[in-house]
């Protein structure tokens, strides 16, 4: 049996320390698939949606796509009783900081949102099916606990929003006044 890669060790260590994270690249490991997605109505959730196809004409940052994405997020958040604290559009991925009204609505919300965004960007629809898979992986979610965690996620989303505008990460962190100096999210 080959020795595990260092990346796998780091990933497993992160999963052990942070059982509130699920999806994204964690789903590629057995350990990441073994447990259910942790959801909670009392705590907010950091949600990330990534697509490597969202470049050039399909970029989320295209003005007509950015406006449509904001519209879709607001529409489905209201429909499924989800409160959106913040949204960052980085071009090839989206960061959302949300709070669920009811646990049962997460699945409906995420299915409706991801399908609608993919259809709006690619132009696929009822009579015109998509030619390929649009999203890279399952949505990454992480439960946010406490005031410090809430503020860190808010800062992180703001930093990503500034990065999407073309500002360097270091400068964006300085502008936002990064609260967790020396720590990564």
Image (cartoon, rainbow, N blue to C red):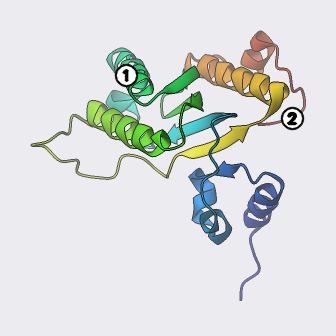
Q: Tell me if mark 1 has few (under 14), some (14-19) or many (20+) residues whose alpha carbon lies within 10 angstroms of its own.
A: few
The residue wearing badge 1 is 75
Farthest bottom residue in view = 1
> Vertical placement of 134 versus 3: above or below?
above
Relative placement, left or right, of 26 versus 4 is left
Marks 2,1: beta carbons within 8 A: no
Q: Tell me if mark 2 has few (under 14), some (14-19) or many (20+) residues whose alpha carbon lies within 10 angstroms of its own.
A: few
Residue under the image location 48 percent in, 44 percent down: 104
Residue 151 rendering spot, x and y as whole percentages: 78, 22
**Is 146 in front, or is 21?**
146
Quarter of the image for the C terminus: give it.
top right
Helix, strand or loop for disc 1: helix
Q: Is residue 89 visible?
A: no
**Is 7 in front, or is 43?**
43
The residue wearing badge 2 is 183
> Vertical placement of 114 versus 159: above or below?
below
Residue under the image location 59 percent in, 65 percent down: 33
Residue 1 rendering spot, x and y as whole percentages: 71, 89
> Vertical placement of 3 versus 173: above or below?
below
Relative placement, left or right, of 66 versus 36 is left
Task: Give the Cα distance between marks 2 and 1.
Answer: 34 Å
> Vertical placement of 49 versus 167: above or below?
below
Relative placement, left or right, of 103 versus 134 is right
Residue 179 rendering spot, x and y as whole percentages: 85, 21
Residue under the image location 63 percent in, 57 percent down: 26
State which quadrant residue 87 falls in: top right
**Is 82 in front, or is 184?**
82
State which quadrant residue 62 falls in: top left
């Amino acid at each position: 049996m080959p020795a595990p890669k260092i990346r796998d060790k780091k990933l497993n260590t992160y999963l052990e320390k942070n059982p509130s994270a699920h999806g994204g690249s964690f789903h590629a490991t057995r350990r990441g698939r073994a447990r259910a997605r942790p959801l909670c109505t009392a705590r907010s959730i950091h949600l990330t949606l990534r697509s490597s196809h969202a470049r050039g004409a399909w970029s989320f940052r295209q003005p007509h796509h950015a406006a449509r994405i904001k519209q879709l997020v607001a529409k489905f958040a209201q429909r499924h009783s989800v409160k959106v604290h913040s949204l960052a559009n980085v071009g090839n991925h989206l960061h959302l900081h949300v709070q669920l009204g009811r646990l049962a609505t997460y699945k409906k919300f995420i299915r409706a949102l991801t399908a609608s965004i993919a259809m709006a960007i690619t132009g696929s629809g009822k009579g015109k099916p998509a030619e390929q898979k649009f999203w890279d992986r399952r949505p990454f979610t992480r439960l946010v606990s406490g005031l410090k965690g809430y503020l860190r996620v808010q800062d992180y989303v703001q930093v990503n929003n500034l990065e999407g505008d073309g500002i360097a990460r270091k400068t964006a962190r300085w502008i936002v006044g990064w609260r967790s100096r020396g720590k990564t999210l």
